[in-house]
Image (tube, helix red, strand yellow):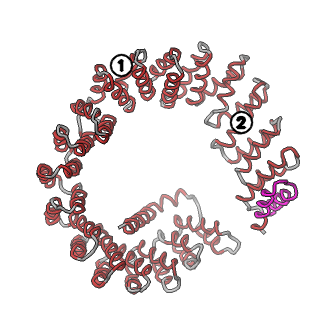
Amino acid sequence: MTKGIVSSACLGALVWLVAARPAQAQQAGAVDPASLIAVLQSADASLHDKALACKQLAVVGDESAVPVLASLLGDEKLSHYARFALEPIPGKAVDAALREALNSVQGTLKLGVINSIGARRDADAIPALKELLASEDSALADAAASALARIGTPDSVGILIESLASAQGDRADFLADALVIGADVLRRDGNKDQAVAVYRTIRGAKLPSRYLVAALHGEIMTAGEEGLALWGEAAQSEDEAVFAAAMGASRNLDPAAAVPRLTQLYAAAPAERRGIILLAVSDLDGRTAAELARQALKGNDAGLQAAALRVLARHGAAQDLDLLGQAVGSENAEVRAAAQAALDTLDAPGIGEALAERLQTAQGDDWLALAATAGRRRLAAAAPVLREALDSPDAARRSAAVTALGAIAQWDDVVALLSRLGKASNDEEKNVIREALRTALRRQPDADAAAGRLAEMVAGSGGESRAFIFELLTIVGGKTALETVVQAAQGDDPELQDLATAALGNWMTPDAAQPLVDLIESGKAERFQVRMLRAYIRIARQLNVEPQERLAMCKKALELARRDAERELVMEVLGRNPGPASLRMVMEEMGRPATAEAAYAAAVAIGEKWTADRSLVTQAMERVIAGTKDAQLKARAEAVLNRIR
């Protein structure tokens, strides 16, 4: 059934694309289909440009684009792009073009055209597809079967039924696959009686069980009262595949009819099936499923207990906390994991308060597990108990409290953790606290407020604590944090200059670029000029800035650079950002012997990605070939020249 699933997905994608065309066309702005058609007709346009034009025509194309797109259906390189553009265009002209192409294209291109016909559900193509279905070429016949299935009319599906009667081997296999798809299409289109007839035809044929089970599932969902009766029989089948199909179909049934039967089935079923039935009940009636789950947890079957815990995760209540807590201590790994997941995700009235209350009295491993749960749930009600535990003599308890408070991430928790950092007696504990603080600062809802509070702490801190506050400022980011760090770099305290310039070197947003330039040009923090320039170049290399701004930054960095090492870093940035301006800057650098090799490498990197201006690229590659001492680089430059000549 894999191919069928893929085919259905492709059909869904086409439906989505057709529905989305108006909105996408609006987003595309005033792209004129005529200009895109001109690109496809141009002898000078590159393959990439033509492929891009096809993609745009898939959004804005109309019947005027059909002739030129149809002419590309026989093109080995562009046929796929042409079909992608044609499929969403409304109108009979597309269907006629695709049918005509069936007579002219061959091989994989023909398979693609057949696929497009199926995607568009062109009923006028049924006679041609019927002929292809009889082909001795199994790939053609398979594609035709799939297209007939997706067209999904009684006539097209009827042809598949006729062919199945005498089919054998692989042909029977792909016809069965197509019939399941065809029946599903009939059902979705409202042709339920015809769909049921097809499902029953499949179930009556001698086919592999996967098709029989798929047809069973379809009939249950389509045949009304008869389908419900069929479901009841299948739910009691000894065949595991049939039983699984019944359980999968149950979520689509009327709960009033299905839940009583499922609960009866649950009571009489063997242990290995109860978990599956319980989950089926939970899809239809959460309250009933929760009651069954509570009873199941009193037993000893680990598989059923795990299923019960998954049910309680969805439908449980605060009253189930004791059951979940007990299950966390199970010797069975699956049960433990399901219980912990339920504790982490159960969303029921009063559950947070109940967890916090339980945390106050829990001991040992139970306390550690509940603390971890409080952190994962970001349970503010548990914070007071966790803060008290920061001074516990038990190292494991302190560590669990630290991690949980970092996840809960209230500002009071940040203050408590910073205080605890100053008391920590070993590196292991300090590392746990630092990581918790990093987590907490990333989750602050108001970055500027958090940065302001951190800024107030700088003056009263020192040593490791002060250095870590600057790290936290880089994590928080934002206007206030940046202003705080820049102000420290502008001051006269060498220690603060060191910490601030190091923080700017790790800043995660490009708004630090101009302050870095200002600091460099002002002569402040002179000891750290190279560090600040490298921080500025890093922003150009790694962060999200507009292309023109990145080029301007590279130019500025070259003006500020006092050493060759930083100029080489700029060359690397330019090499990663191909275009005429970057190539010209690189070519200027070729005249400096100390950095020429870096410039040559950047030029080749640009030429391998961008050749729109062939004359400029040719000049650059010729200079590389004449000047570089690197044989491999020379060979790459020659390859670029050979490609564009």
Is residue 90 in the magenta section?
no
* Badge 2 or badge 1: first in the primary sequence: 1
Residue at the spot x=64%, y=25% of the render? 483
Q: Report if the CB atoms under discs 2 and 1 are less than 8 Å apart.
A: no
Residue 256 in sight here: no
Q: What element does badge 2 sit on?
A: helix
Instruction: Name the kind of residue labelled 1 in the image.
Output: Val
Front disc: 2 or 1: 1
Q: Residue 224, percent across and down?
A: 17, 64
Q: Quadrant of the C terminus?
A: bottom right
Instruction: Please state, as top left, top right, bottom left or bottom right, where the N terminus lies in the image.
Output: bottom left
Could you say which is closer to the camera, residue 331 or residue 432? 331
Q: Quadrant of residue 212?
A: bottom left
The span shown in magenta is 614-640
Q: Is residue 504 above or below residue 568?
A: above
Indicate the secondary structure of the residue bearing disc 1.
helix
Q: Residues within 10 Å of mark 1 (few under 14, many from 20)?
A: some
Residue at image mark 1: 385
The three-letter code of the residue at mark 2 reads Tyr
Q: Is residue 567 visible?
A: yes
Q: Main secondary structure of the magenta part?
A: helix
Q: Which mark is residue 536?
A: 2
Q: Is residue 450 left or right of residue 275?
A: right
Residue 137 tag number: none
Residue 373, position in %: x, y?
Answer: 35, 31
Question: Horizontally, is 380 left or right of 565 in the view?
Answer: left
